[in-house]
Image (cartoon, rainbow, N blue to C red):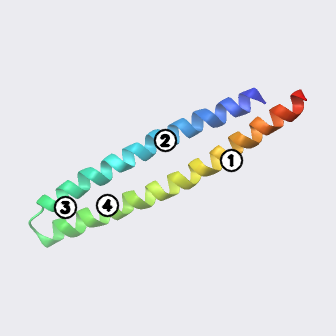
Amino acid sequence: MANVKKELEEMAEVISIEIAREQNSIEYYTKAHKKAVSESAKRLFASLIEQEKGHEVKLRASLRELKAEIELERLKRKEHKA
């Protein structure tokens, strides 16, 4: 069981890193959107921002699920020791 918990924790760490990357991308595209002159560039950056926000939402949902699994593993381990 310890290996499962450790693997879940590592997965949660990876997803947390990816969330930060999505946030950085959103920030980058937002700055580019503000600097853009043409409407086509503005539309492109707005689209990219929305895509990155969608990725972040999905990653956060996955992270919540993993944290719930980690808690279940912790409880199983606690019951097993009792």
Furthest-bottom residue in this view: 39
Q: Mark 1–mark 4 contact, CB under 8 Å? A: no
Residue 46 at x, y percent in the picture? 27, 66
SS at badge 4: helix
* Disc with the residue nearer the chain's start (3 vs 2): 2
C-alpha distance separating marks 1 and 4: 29 Å
- Can you identify the residue that label 3 sits on? 33
Furthest-left residue in this view: 37
Residue 79 at x, y percent in the picture? 87, 35
Q: Mark 2–mark 1 contact, CB under 8 Å? A: no
- Can you identify the residue that label 2 sits on? 16
Quarter assignment of residue 81: top right
- Can you identify the residue that label 1 sits on? 68
Query: From the viewer's perspective, is the residue at label 1 or at label 4 nearer?
Result: 1
SS at badge 1: helix
Which image quadrant: the N terminus?
top right
- Can you identify the residue that label 4 sits on? 49
* Disc with the residue nearer the chain's start (1 vs 3): 3
